[in-house]
Amino acid sequence: MAAVRPGSLITYQLSSVPLQMLFHLSGLYYALYFLATLLMIVYKSQVFSYPSNCLVLDLVLLLLMGIFEVAQLYLGTQGNLTEAEVPLAASLAFTAVSGLLSVHFLLWQTLVLWMDSVLSTVLLVLHGLEAGLQVVVIADFIR
C-alpha cells in the first residue's frame, strides 16, 4: 500500500525491505538450526548419559520453538507486507518467546556442546535484529 505524507508529493511504501529480507534469512537459518540441534540431541543421547526426561524436554522445547518460529515469520511477513501493526506486534511477541527458547538451548540445556553455543548465539543475533527492525517498522506504521 502506498502512503503519501502530508505536505509531500512523494509516494512510497511503508513496508520494510530489510525486515522482509531478514525474515527470509531467519527462516532459512532456523531450518538449519532445527536440523542441526535435532541431530545434536540424537548424538548427545547416544554418546553421553543423557537423562531421558531431559531428552524429552529438549525435544519438546525444540518442536515448540519451531511452532513459534513459523508463526513469528508468517505474522511478521504478513504484517510487513500489509503494513499492519497487529500482526507485526504478535510477531514481535513470538520473537521474544523464541529468543527465550534460544537462551535455553544456549545456556540451560542439559548438555551444551560448542556447536550448540555457536548456533544459538547466531540465532539470538538474528532475533535481536528482527526485534529491532520490527519495533522501527511498527513505529513507522503508527505514525
Image (cartoon, helix red, strand yellow):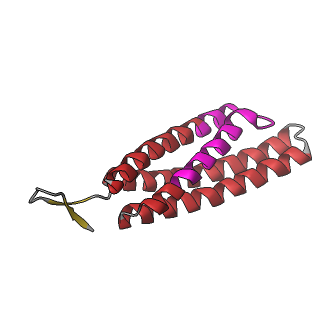
Q: Residue drawn 18% across and 57% down?
A: 5
Quarter of the image with the N terminus in it = bottom left
Magenta stretch, overall SS: helix
Residue 112 in view, yes or no: no
- Magenta stretch: give its range: 91-120
How many numbered tags mark residues here?
Answer: 0
Q: Residue drawn 50% across and 63% down?
A: 75
Q: Residue drawn 67% across and 45% down?
A: 101
Does 70 sit left or right of 81 as displayed? Answer: right
Does 24 sit left or right of 100 as displayed? Answer: left
| Position of residue 57 measured from the top left corner of the image (x, y, whole percent) | 82, 49
| Position of residue 83 measured from the top left corner of the image (x, y, whole percent) | 36, 63
Q: Residue drawn 37% across and 49% down?
A: 139
Q: Is residue 118 magenta?
A: yes
Residue 67 in view, yes or no: yes
Quadrant of res 72: bottom right
Q: Is residue 50 magenta?
A: no
Above or below residue 98? Residue 48 is above
* 55 or 132: nearer the viewer: 132
| Position of residue 110 measured from the top left corner of the image (x, y, whole percent) | 81, 36
Above or below residue 86? Residue 32 is above
Which residue is farthest left? 9
